[in-house]
Structure formats: structure tokens, C-alpha cells
Amino acid sequence: MLLPTKRRHSFLLTRMMRPPNMLTCRKAPDVSTLRGWLLDLYEDPADGLRLWIISEEGERLCLRQPMPITFYAAGEAEQLRSLWKFLRKQPGVLSLSRETRRDVFLPAPIPVLQAVIDNPIRQTRIFRDVQKQFPHLTYYDSDISVTTRHAALYGTFPMAFCEIEADDDNNLQSLRVLNTRWDLSPVFPVFRTLAIEPDCDPVRGTPKTLKLHFQQRQKSLCLDDPAELISRLNSILDEVDPDFILTQWGDNWLIPELLKLSEQAGETLHLNRDAERDVRWQKELTYFSYGQIIYRAEEAHLFGRCHIDQRNAMMWKDYGLDGVLESARVTAQSIERAARVSPGSGISAMQMLTALEHQILVPWHKQQVEEFKNGMDLIHRDRGGLIYQPIVGLHSDVGQIDFISMYPAIIIKGNISPEVPLPNGIVPASDELGVVPLTLKPLYEKRVALKLNQANLRKGDPIAKRDSARASALKWLLVVCFGFLGYKNARFGRIEAHEAVTNGGREVLIRAKEIAESMGFEVLHLFVDALWLKKPGAVNKRDFQDVLNEITEQTGLGVSLDGVYRWVAFLPSRADSRIPVANRYFGVFQDGSSKVRGIEVRRRDTPPWVSEIQTRMMDTLAKAYSLEALPERLNEAFNLFRSALTDMREGKVPVEKLVVTCRITHELEAYKSPTPAVRAAKQLLEQTGKRVRPGQKMRFIYTRGEQDVSAWESSEKLDPSRLDKEKYIELMARAASSVLYPFGIENEELKQWAHSATITLPLKFERQDAHVRPICNHVRPGRVERHAGLGGRASRAAAQP
């Protein structure tokens, strides 16, 4: 929906016209005003910045704007004097001056040398030379993205609705943003989208055609005639003039292939709106994040429109384009960047923006190190989140209570930031908010408001779906903000502040536990920011409202009821069934939805076939409305497992559903005992010359013979007779045992039955005699009586194959 126009402006700035490789415009006599949405902005060596606007009338307009860049240096006076002499000789340096600015890690403002450069591109070049020649100085505000700088100066962000004045040469004269990053119901223009994908996975085969989707139409373009392909693709690009090009394998295959074919055809491909620009390539990158090696493939970035490779976008499966736009909005990163980088990069951009808005220096490289702690200090302070061992088994009518974004809420309430004294628990030591809580407060409040709005929308409402994606994007930013606070390279990170958050979390969770117990609830489980509660007679949401209110009242933090389980099963460790595992459970809420944690369907290395069967087994059990109704569903669930084994033995399972995907974490030569994934990667290297980099995923199939794996990307076609069916049967039995454990089936028993069917399983399907793990029934608060069964004594009977 477009916002109404107060008055139509008297001119139309033209978009860049092709084929002439130059910026053209329709002339207007003087300065005119328009309103529209900011789609993109980027550096330009001549203009400073170029901004692309989608006007209220639907025009795509390009404007120019000067953009001087300021950075700072601090250090010894002699070094600063030498830097001043060096800079005054450089072209494009507009001014040099001595200023006083605030570094949050220092107790008082410090003197700095301020340098103002005329252009973002020139500033990057100059600073590269400066830091090489003067490595001992401390630099600030030197490597901040131009989108963050522009946001700090003008309040802009992707899809900001602006009122703009520009002259007849498309030079921007004034810009006023009419909305904010925190709007709950932002209004967007009608986007133009072009989706392109090959007809097969280019890693596994050679695509023959491209499938295009645009304006509710579909077209196929053949790849065997480069001249015809590029000509037709250019016609579509000119006709549609897309704002978004959404691709599959766009970064690592599609766009490189199209550019190669364009060169062969001798015709320029019109991927960019800005005809003066080529595709910008971002190099591949491997980095360590939150215990994982992450690989980010080479990226193709466009000018004047946005390219998003859905297979290379960070969280696309989780929240799609709606979430990407929301992430770009609140972080003020470009849309293409917001789609590709981690949520941690988003939080970093937001913190830098907050610092710039409050005239706080942003360090180029963090200089601070962790304070010294003795052994007792470490024991007292560094203990992470609070986790209880759950009561293993099946439980009915269990309420799960979650703190709403607990750690971000503690950071805000406790005013936890590197420059602020640490709180006492969650009681702040200072009333003036630090950089980190200042950044998080509007983000947290927006997510809470979105979640509350969602609760009032009917299921299936398109607004509910959109807002769910937006809330998910905000959730991931909030999730990582706590870890980012302790990250050694975070510009505004400090490990002591990180520890203060976990300390506050432990205190709040213990207080919540005590409140629940005082109100007659038994606490079955605690996990960092959640409680699982049970009480005789508490069977619906209303029965948990009083404890929710009391926890909020006494802790000052928001809590919500995730739901009331009809039944939930907490599972033990696979290594020792006597040991509970905190995050290994599955259950069914009263609305029929399931929640699963820590079992095979949640693992990335589980073959799709195994995940699908395990999901179907749990969905079958989910149809039971109570514990008493479970036995009649057990037969159906077990038959799914039995049928899956039959399909495997008879070769009916599609090979693509047996692919195992694992991440490679080191260079291949670094492995002393290669895992199956590493063996497959070495096989791929030998056969095709393709090297799998650390952080990349390796796909393979288990096979029989000396080579017990086969790389999925291998050029050799897999002989189905080489499949290691027994290995896949073992994986299926392992997954099924996670579902059937509460009903008396051990993993080894099920595995043996799956291979030979020569043993008796302790499972009986008749309702009156069905055997289950111990269930907890309450006699009175604080006392638990355990008994086996859904009625009657437990029996062991054969489950016949």
C-alpha cells in the first residue's frame, strides 16, 4: 500500500536508462520536492553517495549527495603531529583539528586529532595508508560503513520514507525522514521482484535452463545459446526493472555463469540499475562464531537493486524477505548485507550507530583485555546459565513458562554495559543507560509489542505471518546480543559485563522457581530462561496465569506461557540412561502443535529420510489427547518405523533422501582420524579437484566396501547396490528409539530388532497393559510418587516384525 501524496511534485527524476552507459535525467527548472522510500545507497568516487528512491508514483530515482567522512586518532603528541603533517598533504582532506571526545573504556574524555575527508572512497584509501605508517596510534570511527554513518547523520535506514528536495541535476538538497526504525506497522511500496533459479543443482549436474518468476508469470530460458539467453534476459530485466533479484545458487554459480555467457555473447547484462557499475564481489570468508566454523561463500552485490541468493542468505529459511527487511530496518545495514551477515554483525552495527548518535568514539580495534581474576573470583562469577536435571519420563498437563528475551531484558534492566559499573544482581548501579542497553531497549520493546499484536490476530492472517517473520528477525538479534557482549573482538564488549548477565539470569530463575513452589507447583525442569511446572488441577492456560503474574511482579521481567503440554517426555543421555539431559525432550501442546529439542530431527547431520520418519512418528503420537490415549497411537507410530525399514531393504527410498550433511571444521590435511565427512571431502578432491574449505558443508552417502562413503557432489554416478542399507537401518533405529524410549524401548534393543527381529521388545500396544517409563503423579507439593503404567502393571510383550 502506498502512502498518500500531499501534492504531486513538479518533476520526475529518471532512473538510469540503458543502453547508454551514463547517468541521464529529465531536466527541471529548479529545486523540487518528492516523497518516497530509500531502497539503496552506496559510495561513488565522484558524487560521494548515490541514493536510490522508490517514489510514491512508483518511479525508481537516483540522487547524488556529497558525504564527507570523519575519523579520529589518539596517542602521543609527537605521533599525532606527524600524522597531521602527513594528512595535510593528502588530496581530499577538508579539515584537521584538535577535539575532545569520549572513549567509553576510559574514565574521562580524551584529546584526539579529527580528520574530515571529502569522500567515503577516498577516506578508505587514506586510512589504509595512515594505519600502515602510524601503527602505534589508536583510531576511532575509521571503518564504519557508509550506511551506518548516513543513518547517524540523517536518521535513514533501508525503506525509510523520506521527503526529499533535489535540483535539476539530481543533486540532493535536503532529506527528511518521516518514519522511524521502530514503527510497528511500516508501509512499503509495491516491490518488483524477479526470481531466477537453474533447473537442477549445479553442484550435482549441468543446468540446461533457467526458470524465471515475475509479475505472476513464469518463463524458461535455455542456456545453450548465450546470445539469445542474454538478449531475452535483458528484455525481462528492462521490462520488470526489479527491486529484488532472488536467486538459487546465485553467488557461486548463476551470476558468474551469466557474466561468462554475457561476455561470450558480446552483450552487457543489465543486472545493475546503475549502468555505470559492474557487479561487486565480496570475497569468500571462513570464521569462528559461537563454537562453529562458518563459511560464507563469495557474494555478488548489485547497485540500485538488491540481489539475495536464498541459499547463501544467513537466516532466509527462518524469516524470508519480511525478516530481512526488518533486520535491515533496525540495524540500518543495506538490505543485501542484512540478508547475508550474522545477527552479531547486525548488533555490532546497531551499537556503532548508537555510539555515533551520542558522540561516543567507535574504536577501530578493541584494546581492552579481561581483568585478572583469582580462582575464587572465577568460581563466583563465571558460571553461565542455570540448568536443572529434568525428571526423566512422561508427564501430563505441564506448563512451560519462558522469560521474554531474558538476557536482553536483564541487560536493559540492570543497565549492563562496558562503561557502566556492574549491577548488584539486576539492580543497576547507574541510572544513565550505557551504549549496550541504549541499543537494545527499543529493539526489545518492539519485539514484545509485535508478539503482543500477533496474539490478537487470527491464525492464517497474512499480517500475522509477516509479523511473525519480523519478530523472528528481532529475536535473533536479541539472542546474540548477550554472547556478543562477551566476544573478545566486540567493539563494545566486556567479559565482566557478560558474566554479570549470567549472574542476573541465575538469580531471576531461582527466584521464579521459589515463587512457583510457594504457589504449589512442582518444578520438573529449569533451563536458563524457562521453567516446566506441574500442579494437580492445573490443566489449562488460566491455571498458570497467577504464577505468571507473580513472577513478573517479583522479578520485574516479562514472562509468557509457551503453552500447556498434553504430555511431554524428558529423555536421558544415550551414554547412560540414568543421567537426564537438559535439552533433550519432545511433547505436544494442547493445540496439537509439537515441540522437539535435542533429538535427531533437530540435527543438521540427520538424513532427510530419517528426519521425515521420526517426525511422522511424533506427529502420530501427537494425535493422542492424553496419556491414556497414547497406546492406540503407539501401534501406528511403530508401524511407520517398520514400514520405513521395509522400504530401505527393498530399495524404495530415494537416494537424495539419504544424503548426510556435515560441516568441515579444519583443513583436510589437519585431520589425524578423518570422519566420514572428511573422507568424502578427500574423495571429492581426488575425483574433481574441488576443495572443501573449513566451514563448508560436505554431503555424502554411506556405502558398502573399502570406500565406506561416496561424495554426493562426485562426478561418478552412485550404484544403488553400493548403499550401506544396514548403516541407514541403524540410523533409523537410533531415531526411532528417541521417540519410543518413554515406552520402554532402549536404543540397543531396537537396533538389534531392526537388524534381525529375533528379540522380544518390551512394548505392548493394548491400552490397558501398555508399558511406559515412570510417570510423576503428585500426592502433595514437594512429594512425588512414581509408578509405571497408563493403568495396570507393566508387561513385556513381543512387537512382531
Image (spheres, rainbow, N blue to C red):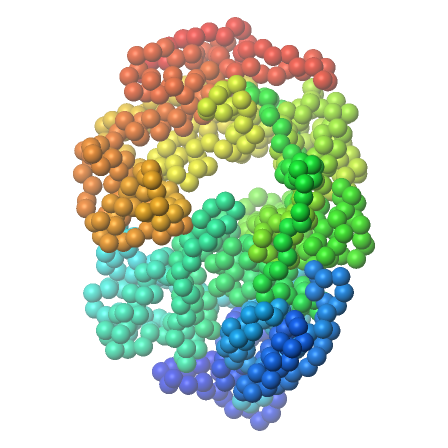
- Can you say whether 713 is above or below 601 in the image? below
Q: Is residue 7 left or right of residue 597?
A: right
- Can you say whether 439 is above or below 117 in the image? above
For residue 43, say whether it is visible.
no
- Can you say whether 611 is above or below 793 in the image? below
Q: Nearer the viewer, residue 533 or 790?
A: 533
In percent of width and height, residue 619 lies at 46, 30
The quarter of the image holding the N terminus is bottom right
Q: Is residue 53 left or right of residue 532?
A: left
Q: Is residue 189 left or right of residue 689?
A: right
In percent of width and height, residue 257 lies at 29, 65
Q: Residue drawn at (55%, 90%), measured in percent from left and top?
A: 168
Q: Residue furthest bottom?
A: 29
Q: Quadrant of residue 427?
A: top right
Q: Quadrant of residue 329?
A: bottom right
For residue 789, say whether it is visible.
yes
Q: Residue drawn at (32%, 66%), measured in percent from left and top?
A: 256
Q: Residue drawn at (55%, 11%), measured in percent from left and top?
A: 788
In percent of width and height, residue 799 lies at 37, 13
In percent of width and height, residue 510 lies at 72, 32
Q: Is residue 645 left or right of residue 598?
A: left
